[in-house]
Amino acid sequence: MRIVSLLPAATDLVATLGQLGNLVGRTHECDWPPEISAVPVVTTAEIDPGSSSSREISDAVGGSAHRGSSLYSVDVEQLAELAPDLVLTQDLCAVCAVSYTRVADAVRMMDAGPRVLSLEPRTLAEVLGCVATLGDALGVPEVAAERDAGLRQRLADVRAGVAGRARPRVVALEWLDPLWPAGHWVPEQITTAGGAPLLAQPGEHTEPMPWDAVLDARPDVLLVLPCGFSPDRTADELDVLTTRPGWAQLPAVRAGQVWLLDGPSYFNRPGPRVVRGAEILASILHDVPADPPVTGAEARQVR
């Protein structure tokens, strides 16, 4: 089966299921595992997040040119040349990946239309459920069942490791300007890791919030995991937070419990690596050992 993945999380799933050999196309944002670098890229971004601030990116997303549409383009000719049997996409967020509507339009322009599978998990359980869904679509249900069991066991191990411990109050931010609390599966990652999530509910598609909401929440721990930003990229723009009034008085800041996390790898994308995200959080919140140990590329404490 020839697969084109237009969703980085779906590419993670393809890898987890041992089907990378069937991956013939991907997005420009698919960056894991490293060996997919040789797979042809069939999308481009209409803005350059690497050279734009959070506010500039947000303004571009909300501007009239992008309102209600995807920020990504699909190379329809190349997609047709790759002749996929299955195209993986999503309809959850037009900012995070190519929209289902745009993919559907591209497929309709092809002579022989492939199957389009949209993966749209909002909760941790639904993220794990995508393993079985894609396993069935790829004809490897037994492999999917084994991988799913392994992921669930790792989450159970995290829960066991933090059982009975006091739960710090945690705010997670998935965007800096405007401020945006991390919703969907992230509150469940925090709960699994022994924290008490604030400002968002499991499965919630959140909205921008005022800075006063963070001040009023008085978090013991502040997680900064902007969508699409590495910890280094986040650090370059951290003054968007640190210069706000009342920053120094936040309990998390006073206790040195502000963390920059690798959002794209472990928190923003609904793929198998959200399990590693929970393991990282258990290490941060309760010093529970992770295997392998958490690195500075995954989580960095703000000093």
Image (cartoon, rainbow, N blue to C red):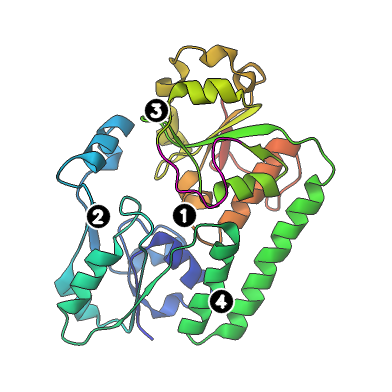
Ranked by sequence position, the earlier of labels 2 and 3 is 2
Instruction: Identify the residue at horizontal 30%, vertical 58% (top origin).
Output: 28
Left/right placement of residue 260 relative to residue 74 reads right
Residue linked to disc 1: 269
Q: CA distance from mark 1 to mark 3?
A: 22 Å
Q: Quadrant of residue 237?
A: top left
Mark 3 highlights which residue?
236
Residue 169 relative to residue 79: left or right: right
Instruction: Identify which amino acid the numbered label 3 is placed on.
Output: Asp
Write down the region rendered in magenta: 198-207
Name the mark on residue 30. Answer: none
Mark closer to the chain start, 2 or 4:
2
- Look at the image and tell me in which quarter the N terminus lies: bottom left
Quick check: can you spot residue 164?
yes
Query: What residue appears at the point 57 percent right and 38 percent down from the top-left corner?
Result: 299
The image shows residue 264 at horizontal and vertical percentages of 45, 49
Q: Nearer the viewer, residue 130 or 237?
A: 130
Disc 4 residue type? Ala
Give whichever of discs 4 and 1 has the lower sequence position. Answer: 4
Which residue is under mark 4? 132
- Marks 2 and 4 sit apart, C-alpha to C-alpha, by 27 Å
**Circle nearer the N terminus (1, 2):** 2
Residue 261 locus on image (x, y percent): 53, 39
Does 233 appear above or below 117?
above
Q: Main secondary structure of the magenta part?
A: loop
